[in-house]
Amino acid sequence: MTEQVIEKIESMEKKREKEKHGKETIRSSVVLKIYRANKRAGEQPHYDSVEVPVQRWTTVLDALLHAKQYKDPSIGIRYSCRMASCGSCGMKINGIPRLACYTKVSELEGSTVTVEPLANFPHIRDLVTDFAQFFSHHHDVKPFVQNENADIKDKNKLSEFMQSPEDLDKFLQFSYCIKCGLCYSACPTVATDTKFPGPQALSQAYRYFIDNRDNATKDRINIVDDKHGIWRCHFAGSCSSVCPKGVDPALGIQLLRGHMLGFSKNEKKIADLQDRLRKDEEAKQ
Amino acid sequence: MMLRESQIMKIHYITGIAALFVVAVHIMMRLIMPYSLSLEYENVIANYHNVPYLVLLESILVLIAIHGFNGLRIILLELRQSKAWEDGITILTIAAMMAVVAYGTRTIIIANGFGLGFE
């Protein structure tokens, strides 16, 4: 029985792999249509077309770096790790926010690849955008574990906060966020409301809210429960569909809303009560 | 007293769900006789003299006014982000909601008469 299931899964995987490769188009070159603008230097927005040679494994970032190295060194790009870990090379590729280092040219349709700066971010130059507002929203939700019981001042005494695999599962996917800003760029609410924290900050608020080591729930809820806070999410879900790390910010937002409306039981409150009861019993003994 | 946004949204969702229910009852009440007959003057006035139906109409008015004007406030909030604008539209939508509820209630009172000689 188990062998049959394994065989079935393997055949499905092979089929999926075949479909994936079927989508790939092998080309020897593509035309990169690059958005160029530098308001400070008085350069008006326009597109430059550059033809670059590509291989099957060439990513959009590789193509852009080739263009920068051999065709036009003035192209402005921000990048760092080239392996979808740093989240620096986010840009709109053929109209969709993606990481340039994580998007292969062969996966894209057509022989022209259009690259533009991320939407919803102030523009700096060419493909580079300003992340100050985005990081400010991230900073506002206090994205770190806060616990007044932690003995961080006493180096000799190390606190240990027990966490079960079940507790970890509640927030693990949200901790994979690399702050690339793709979800922020895809969010229709951010496009109209600059005070809206955006999917990244809100999903991080949920990540720390549900973490049983953190006890600053009230503070964090006060921050997101605002006129321009969590309730302004339209639940378009575009944030989740563009995330390169498989994080589902829309889910985090809905779960946090559920907690705020009292639809879901608050495990933290229950844990607090259990802890108090245990301490009372210990005191009695 | 300032309500938190989560409390406002709770009211928004509850009034939305409750409005669905009362409007469904209201539509069903229209269909107990041929639709054109239900809108005749005598029948409409007779409806206003039916106290449970009167309560239903008032609750539709209140629920839809709260839900609708809060929805409008939310839409307008996204247009601009400034304290003056936020406060302005909050006051404006609350005032408009109260005006609509007051005008609707006045209509219900006049149509019913309540033995006050309004008929």
Image (cartoon, rainbow, N blue to C red):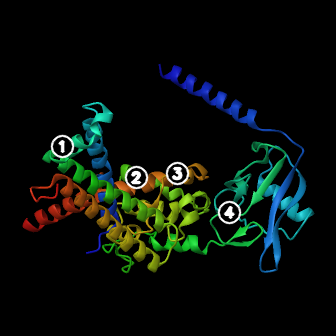
Q: Which residue is mark 4?
A: A118
Cα distance, mark 4 to mark 1? 62 Å
Q: Marks 4 and 1: same chain?
A: no
Q: Residue at x 90, y 54 (%)?
A: A51
Amino acid bearing label 3: Ala
Cα distance, mark 4 to mark 2? 30 Å
Disc 2 is placed on an element classified as helix
Q: Position of residue A9 (x, y in %)?
A: 56, 27
Q: Position of residue A53 (x, y in %)?
A: 90, 50
Is the C-beta separation of discs 4 and 2 under 8 Å? Answer: no
Q: Residue at x 46, y 54 (%)?
A: A172
Disc 4 is placed on an element classified as loop
- A129 and B58: which is toward the camera: B58
Say which chain tag 4 marks: A
Sequence-first disc among 4 and 2: 4
> How many numbered marks are there?
4
Q: Which residue is mark 1?
A: B46
Q: Marks 1 and 3: same chain?
A: no
* Within-10-Å neighbours for mark 1: few <14, some 14–19, many 20+: few
Q: Position of residue A225 (x, y in %)?
A: 38, 67
For discs 4 and 1, the disc positioned in front in the rendered view = 1
Q: Which residue is mark 2?
A: A170
Amino acid bearing label 2: Lys
Disc 3 is placed on an element classified as loop
- A214 and B31: which is toward the camera: B31
Cα distance, mark 1 to mark 3? 46 Å
Q: Which residue is mark 3?
A: A236
Q: Position of residue A76 (x, y in %)?
A: 79, 69
